[in-house]
Amino acid sequence: MRLAGKKAIVTGGASGFGYGIAEKFINEGAQVLIADINKDAAHEAAAKLGAFGTACDVAKDLDVAALAKTAQEKMGCIDILVNNAGITHLPAAMEEISEEDFDRVLNVNAKSVYLSAKHIVPIMKSQGAGVILNVASTAGVSPRPRLSWYNASKGWMITATKAMAIELAPAGIRVNAINPVAGETPLLKSFMGEDTPEVREKFVSTIPIGRFSTPEDMGNAAAFLCSDEASMITGVAMEVDGGRCI
């Protein structure tokens, strides 16, 4: 029960890595507020896990402000924030990605981190403690071709993690990231462009351990980094990638 008594927000928590993180946190004793752009999915996941659920578009200022308020109302404080919600564009040459898709990727993957800092960091500062975990990607360390602006958004998130960590350490707030390799989530097909045995085999061949990552893998890594066991760890971007970035 390494997170006993902790109050956590997990964005994009209704599916994929976010769901795995929320489930692990609850199993480790935390109270969790699952935020997801899909309201029904958020409440369904919350009911299944024994969490709170709320709708939130993490790219919108008013939604994130409401999320912070809801978390305080339901849980009393915010000890942990997991910025997990993310999106990608379909694989294509960088010059062929539409401006609409570019804006969407950067708003969800990058602007959301800014908005959560704007509304939740002041709460953590007032508490004198807190932990923020950004779910970045191996794409920010070892980019794959034809996912250019997604790669860039995750590289931004890794640098933001380090910038946040150095600034917030004196306030008692730790900030880390995890870099998942592609996994069995709703985004997998978007990364691959098409979901066929051949494409899956090609992807897995780049992962030395020989399999995709799982929500459970991310939950285990997140639980450690957000626990007091990691009290001396801040500003790291931990690869959870089966050796992909070696």
Image (cartoon, rainbow, N blue to C red):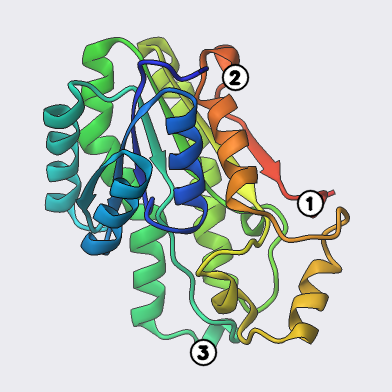
Give residue 96's mark.
Answer: 3
Q: Please tell me which residue lies in front, 246 or 1.
A: 1
Position above or below: 13 against 195:
above
Q: Please tell me which residue lies in front, 198 or 98.
A: 198
Q: Name the residue located 25 percent from the left edge and 12 percent from the top edge.
A: 127
Position above or below: 77 against 147:
above
Distance between mark 1 and mark 2 Cα atoms: 21 Å
Residue 126, image x, y percentages: 21, 14
Q: Is residue 169 left or right of residue 215?
A: left
Q: Name the residue located 20 percent from the left edge and 49 percent from the top edge.
A: 54
| Sequence-first tag of 3 and 1 | 3
Residue 6, image x, y percentages: 36, 20
Residue 91, image x, y percentages: 59, 82
Q: Name the residue located 48 percent from the left edge and 84 percent from the top edge.
A: 97
Distance between mark 3 and mark 2 Cα atoms: 40 Å
Residues under numbered marks 3 and 2 in contact, where contact means CB atoms less than 8 Å apart: no
The quadrant holding residue 120 is top left
Q: Is residue 58 visible?
A: no
Residue that numbered label 2 is attached to = 233
Instruction: Assign a secondary structure to mark 3.
Output: helix
| Sequence-first tag of 3 and 2 | 3
Q: Is residue 244 left or right of residue 24?
A: right
Instruction: Assign a secondary structure to mark 1.
Output: loop
Q: Is residue 141 visible?
A: yes
